[in-house]
């Protein structure tokens, strides 16, 4: 039973050292997370989020509150900031102003920096898998990063990849490649899954398959952000915003 977490003034460096020591001794992130920040229904929160490139304003004062198990759709035309927003949410780039919190952990000033990769899964527009490896070897590699090698079969089955597992990733269809990318993005059991243009170059059958996977993930409590320039593909979203 996890005890109630209360507010306390704790030296972040000391807490980080304790986390690293316990993690190295075999304690899982699922056990450690509740002791390091509050569980909350609000998984993603932004306040005054702004980003400029040169004279171009990409985002201005974006405020979001996205709850656990919600699918948020973000639609905009090409070069209107969808990928930049995804990169901001993941901490890949920094905003010019504003804050981002993932499960009450500040993306740019986290209490324990090594927790951030366990909170977020990101499937980018461009493939993140190794094209020269089989699907199985790609899954094994990513799962090994998080010490979850035993979950290979479960993960492959959940995204209908078992029958393709011995095929080189570069030789499979775009739809199966996208499912592989999603599998790699959820290998760490993220609280927040971000998918940038996941339906590009997919036919209606493949889009339907991806949505079945995403709605199943939502039932486990995963919060999902999906971007697209085709709003008709966002019919299953709980919320939709336009940039």
Image (cartoon, rainbow, N blue to C red):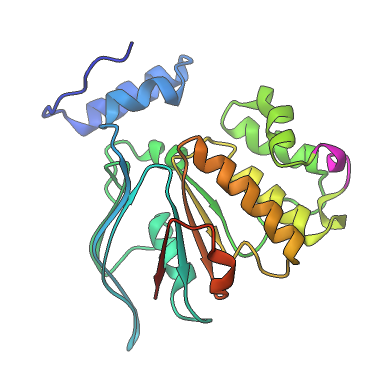
User: Hey, which residue is sitting farthest front in the picture?
Assistant: 235
Badge count = 0
In depth, the one of 17 and 26 nearer the eye is 26
- Magenta span includes 165: yes
The spot of residue 206 in percent (x, y) is 74, 58
The spot of residue 62 in percent (x, y) is 28, 68
Q: Which quadrant, please, contains the C terminus?
A: bottom left
Location of residue 118 with respect to 65 vertically, above or below: above
User: Hey, which residue is sitting farthest top in the picture?
Assistant: 1
> Residue 138 lies in what quarter of the image?
top right
Location of residue 25 with respect to 119 vertically, above or below: above
> Residue 146 lies in what quarter of the image?
top right
Q: Residue at x 85, y 43 (%)?
A: 164
Classify residue 201 as left or right of residue 97: right
Q: Which residues are magenta?
A: 162-167
Classify residue 144 as left or right of residue 55: right
Q: Residue at x 71, y 38 (%)?
A: 139
Location of residue 50 with respect to 19 vertically, above or below: below
Q: Which quadrant, please, contains the N terminus?
A: top left
Q: Residue at x 39, y 62 (%)?
A: 88
Classify residue 227 as left or right of residue 204: left
Q: Residue at x 64, y 30 (%)?
A: 144
The spot of residue 5 in percent (x, y) is 21, 23
Classify residue 20 as left or right of residue 201: left
- Magenta span includes 182: no
């Amino acid at each position: 039973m996890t005890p109630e977490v209360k507010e306390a003034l704790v030296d972040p460096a000391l807490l980080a050292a304790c986390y690293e020591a316990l993690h190295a001794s075999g304690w899982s992130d699922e056990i450690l997370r509740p002791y390091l920040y509050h569980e909350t229904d609000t998984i993603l929160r932004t306040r005054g989020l702004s980003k400029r490139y040169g004279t171009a304003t990409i985002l201005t004062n974006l405020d979001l509150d996205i709850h656990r198990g919600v699918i948020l759709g973000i639609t905009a035309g090409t070069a209107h900031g969808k990928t930049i927003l995804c990169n901001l949410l993941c901490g890949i780039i920094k905003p010019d102003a504003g804050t981002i919190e993932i499960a009450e952990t500040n993306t740019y000033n986290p209490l324990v920096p090594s927790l951030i990769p366990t909170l977020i899964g990101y499937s980018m527009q461009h493939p993140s898998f190794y094209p020269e490896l089989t699907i199985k070897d790609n899954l094994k590699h990513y799962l090994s990063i998080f010490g979850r090698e035993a979950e290979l079969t479960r993960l492959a089955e959940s995204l209908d990849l078992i029958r393709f597992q011995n095929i080189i990733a570069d030789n499979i269809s775009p739809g199966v490649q996208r499912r592989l990318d999603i599998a790699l993005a959820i290998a760490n059991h993220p609280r927040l899954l971000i998918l940038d243009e996941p339906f590009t170059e997919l036919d209606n059958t493949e889009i339907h398959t991806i949505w079945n996977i995403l709605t199943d993930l939502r039932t486990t409590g995963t919060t999902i952000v999906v971007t697209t320039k085709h709003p008709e593909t966002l019919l299953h979203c709980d919320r939709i915003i336009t940039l």
